[in-house]
């Protein structure tokens, strides 16, 4: 019978040594299956040493602890690994930069659950019903952008800073700070599979390729080897490690049955009476139902007309609101270019109050063919020095802030060649390190009054001020 857990590691095509290691074995008297991927960093030998120390410390700590709080056991196991690495760094000056990142999972098949603890950019996935779900978050800037939807998977895989991590084991005593170790638990249902892997896999192949490998009838060892082969075929630029655990219990299935009414054959009289009762009852039910139906028809028609009228009214109001909004904001829908669409989507689609605009060295400006409409209560757009430039055929504003905007901060960006840099319909605009190059009107504030309004008030002085910069 094939095992329901499997681990494999490979040096890859470009590295001469393997700084990865893994755990895939039963622990705590076979109550759990331990699965762990460890990726060492810090030089030719340092990464291997850190990974080995973490591997041994984790198994040793789990083996000698019997606490019922599994999450606490896992966190303390990672703390023990951190301390082992840090102590070694004090002794060995040649490996003083060594550290490691890892993801640890304990699968409790008896109770259909798994627990996990995670630091760094190794990953844990749950594969269920032919769908692959990323459970852990990458502790890196690029990982944050990808997890928050600001960067696509393909762009993250190609980003030059994708391997720069924010957290690792071996960085002194900061492991004790709250939330440094990411932990959690999840149902682990019969048929589910978890995948733990190093970035040597996910930097080379995307989720679609991983899913196609896992969605086969092969046993876990063949699936693991297939993932390694796929990463190597894609370039194998780093060490590659994969651990798979499957809940191979058969799902329970229950068949619902309807009770049957039996009539004795030797009691024909009772049978005739039963048939007669059923017939009479059926006739009474039909008459009763007809009365109910006939009395409820007018009410049903009235309610239907009422609902239909309300629906038509809502659609009409929605149509009018959309038209008024488009007219008021002078927004003309156009087909945006790819860079422009990514920027617009990141602004309008973000669930947080911050938007990061990546500006890599040598990148061309983001060309705008239509105004980017901002309709959020508060937003911080961090440009990182990016230039947003008007298309030669576009004459409108770069950004249009709706009346709903109470606080919008534009930070570290340049607006170039716009007729209007920012069109503001409220007093919510704030600027920080913003340049307006060849913009006829940098900021224009717009007030809307209807024909019947009697207006009182004054134009207050603006708080914007100019900081001179040397032209390059």
Image (cartoon, grey):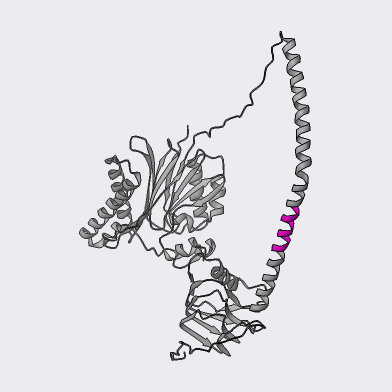
Query: Residue 384 in the image: x percent, y percent?
Result: 46, 76
Tell me the residue at 77%/19% (across/down).
276
Q: Quadrant of residue 100?
A: bottom left
The secondary structure that most of the magenta stretch takes on is: helix
* Vertical position of residue 89 compared to residue 432: above or below: above
Query: Residue 77 in the image: x percent, y percent?
Result: 30, 48
Is residue 4 in view from this perspective? yes
Of residue 139 and residue 332, the one placed in the foreground of this image is 332
* Vertical position of residue 32 compared to residue 363: above or below: above
Query: Residue 260 in the image: x percent, y percent?
Result: 66, 21
Does 158 lie within the magenta span? no
Of residue 109 and residue 51, the one placed in the foreground of this image is 109
Q: In the image, 34: left or right of 402?
A: left
Tell me the residue at 54%/40% (across/down).
218
Q: Which residues are magenta?
A: 304-314
Count up the numbered dots: 0
Is residue 52 in view from this perspective? no
Q: In the image, 38: left or right of 189?
A: left
Does 309 lie within the magenta span? yes
């Amino acid at each position: 019978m094939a095992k329901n857990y499997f681990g494999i590691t490979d040096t890859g095509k470009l590295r001469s040594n393997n700084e990865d290691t893994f755990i895939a074995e039963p622990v705590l008297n076979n109550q759990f299956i331990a699965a762990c991927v460890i990726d060492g960093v810090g030089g030719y030998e340092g990464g291997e040493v850190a990974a080995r120390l973490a591997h041994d410390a984790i198994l040793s700590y789990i083996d000698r602890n019997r606490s019922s709080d599994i999450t606490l056991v896992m966190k303390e196991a990672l703390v023990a690994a951190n301390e082992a690495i840090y102590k070694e760094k004090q002794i060995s000056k040649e490996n003083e930069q060594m550290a490691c990142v890892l993801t640890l999972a304990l699968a409790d098949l008896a109770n259909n659950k798994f627990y996990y603890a995670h630091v760094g950019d190794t990953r844990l996935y749950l594969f269920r019903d032919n769908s692959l779900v990323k459970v852990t978050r990458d502790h890196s800037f690029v990982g944050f952008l990808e997890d928050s939807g600001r960067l696509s998977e393909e762009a993250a895989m190609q980003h030059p800073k994708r391997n720069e991590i924010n957290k690792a084991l071996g960085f002194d005593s900061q492991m004790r700070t709250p939330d440094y170790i990411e932990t959690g638990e999840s149902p682990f249902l019969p048929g589910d599979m978890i995948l733990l892997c190093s970035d040597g896999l996910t930097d080379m192949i995307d989720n679609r390729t991983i899913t196609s490998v896992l969605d086969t009838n092969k046993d876990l060892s063949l699936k693991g080897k297939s993932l390694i082969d796929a990463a190597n075929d894609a370039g194998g630029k780093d060490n590659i490690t994969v651990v798979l655990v499957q809940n191979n219990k058969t799902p329970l299935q229950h068949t619902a049955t309807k009770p049957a009414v039996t009539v004795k054959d030797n009691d024909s009289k009772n049978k005739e009476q039963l048939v007669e009762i059923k017939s009479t009852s059926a006739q009474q039910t039909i008459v009763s139902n007809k009365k109910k139906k006939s009395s409820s028809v007018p009410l049903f028609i009235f309610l239907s007309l009422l609902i239909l009228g309300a629906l038509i009214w809502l659609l009409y109001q929605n149509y009018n609101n959309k038209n008024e909004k488009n007219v008021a904001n002078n927004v003309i829908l156009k087909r945006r270019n790819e860079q422009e669409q990514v920027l617009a989507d990141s602004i309008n689609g973000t669930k947080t109050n911050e938007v990061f605009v990546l500006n890599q060295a040598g990148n061309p400006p983001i060309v705008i063919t239509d105004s980017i409409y901002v309709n959020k209560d508060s937003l911080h757009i961090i440009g990182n020095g990016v230039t947003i430039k008007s298309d030669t055929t576009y004459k409108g504003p770069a950004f249009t802030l709706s009346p709903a905007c109470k606080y919008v901060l534009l930070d570290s960006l340049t607006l170039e060649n716009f007729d209007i840099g920012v069109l503001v319909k409220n007093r919510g605009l704030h600027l920080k390190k913003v340049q307006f190059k060849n913009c006829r009107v940098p900021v224009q504030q717009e007030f809307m009054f209807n024909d019947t309004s009697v207006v009182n008030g004054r134009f207050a002085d603006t708080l914007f001020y100019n900081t001179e910069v040397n032209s390059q």
